[in-house]
Amino acid sequence: MSLQEALLAGDRLALSRFLTQVENGEPQAQTVLDSLYPYSGQAHRIGITGAPGTGKSSLVNRLAQQIRADSGRRVAIVAVDPSSPFSGGAILGDRVRMRDLSGDTGVFIRSMASRGAVGGLALATARVVQVFDAIGYDVVLIETVGAGQSEIEIARLAHTTLVVEAPGFGDDIQAIKAGIMEIADILVINKADLPGVENTERALRMNLDMGYAEAGHHGAGALTPYEEGTSVPASLWVPPIIRTIATQTEGIAALLNSIAEHFQYLKQSGRLGEIERERLSVEINRLLQQRLVERWQRGQKPDAVAAALEKVISREWSPSQAVDWLLNPE
Ligand SMILES: Nc1nc2c(ncn2[C@@H]2O[C@H](COP(=O)(O)OP(=O)(O)O)[C@@H](O)[C@H]2O)c(=O)[nH]1
Ligand SMILES: [Mg+2]
């Protein structure tokens, strides 16, 4: 049996090894990735992001269990934790998950860390998600810590992005501080059993309303007319705010409903096609840049960049002149 056949047939050991090759950017993995690509484009990719400790892993766990119980659809979980490449934090979270989801062959869990990922974590994550999609996982849950730019990029791999908030950080809304409110399709207030949940919801709603007032003032030209009796354009998705208690499996069904509604909205509005186009365009551009740099580096003396840097530091060349020289040394 070829590796591709083994993967499509659900061989978990083969999959596990293959994903490691993919993360490490091994050339033989690319051939298999290429042959799997035509099978992709079916899965619902769901991003889950938010500050550490808000309960993302617990939620992902519950979502996976509920999806399995409701529909038997196959679920892949990709946990990205760039903050702790050495502590193995993501791996630890996985152990807990393994316990809850173990023995279910319809669930596959993969941790990603920045270590070892060739070409960057975002690109490696994109490839891993593509593999799950291609080999028949219907839902891919992508958990990231919502902090830096690369995590926001990873969240953008998703069709539907959940931003998870929890009460108990004072009056601060972590998602606003991290600048990730804009990427939310659904806002989740997890730990709704804790005090302060009303404050959190009020602050989130205020922030949302502000965002939509702005869209109304400045972006109206690009939007379809307002629907009767509503304050937002018919074509615009308004992120719902869903309360959950992951530890008690509360609100999970409501959250899954919202997720399904959002996917439906994407399909009906044509947004799904646009998102796919954007995502693939970004991937092609990133690969092109990566390959061009690699190709250029192959023809270079190893110390050329260092030599150019010295000239820039001594003000002999500007950075732009240095690059001119690197590309066309005379
Ligand atoms: N009280 C309460 N605790 C929760 C809830 N969901 C998760 N936790 C706890 O919060 C801690 C962090 O959860 P985790 O899922 O690892 O958060 P993550 O860092 O966002 O992935 C764990 O101790 C969980 O048991 C909840 O709904 N209510
Ligand atoms: Mg986690």
Image (cartoon, rainbow, N blue to C red):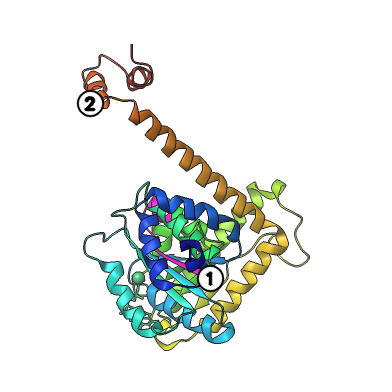
Give residue 324's position: percent from left, percent from top. 38, 18
Which region is colored magenta? 136-152
**Residue 94: x and y, percent?**
33, 74
Is 151 part of what is drawn in magenta? yes
Is residue 231 in view?
Answer: no
Closer to the chain start, of discs 1 and 2, is 1
Residue 303 - label: 2
Q: Amino acid at mark 1?
A: Tyr
Residue type at mark 2 is Asp
Q: At x 34% / y 17%, what residue is drawn?
A: 325
**SS assignment at label 2:** loop
Looking at the image, the residue that sits furthest to the right is: 228
Residue 241 in the image: x percent, y percent? 54, 72
Residue 265 picture location, percent across and down: 67, 66
Number of disc labels: 2
**Residue 105 sits inside the magenta stretch:** no
Q: Give the alpha-carbon distance from disc 1 to disc 2, as whole Å.
A: 46 Å
Residue furthest to the front:
1
Residue 278 relative to residue 86: left or right: right
- Determine the image quadrant of residue 77: bottom left
Disc 1 and disc 2 in contact, CB within 8 angstroms: no
130 sits left or right of 12 in the view:
right
Count residues near mark 2 (Cα–Cα under 10 Å), then give few for <14, some for 14-19, many for 20+. few
Report the quarter where the C terminus lies: top left
The one nearer the camera, 48 or 222, is 48
Give the image quarter of residue 237: bottom right
323 up-or-down from 45: above or below: above
Q: Name the residue beneath numbered marker 1.
A: 137
- Front residue of this view, candidates 121 and 24: 24
Residue 294, quarter of picture: top left
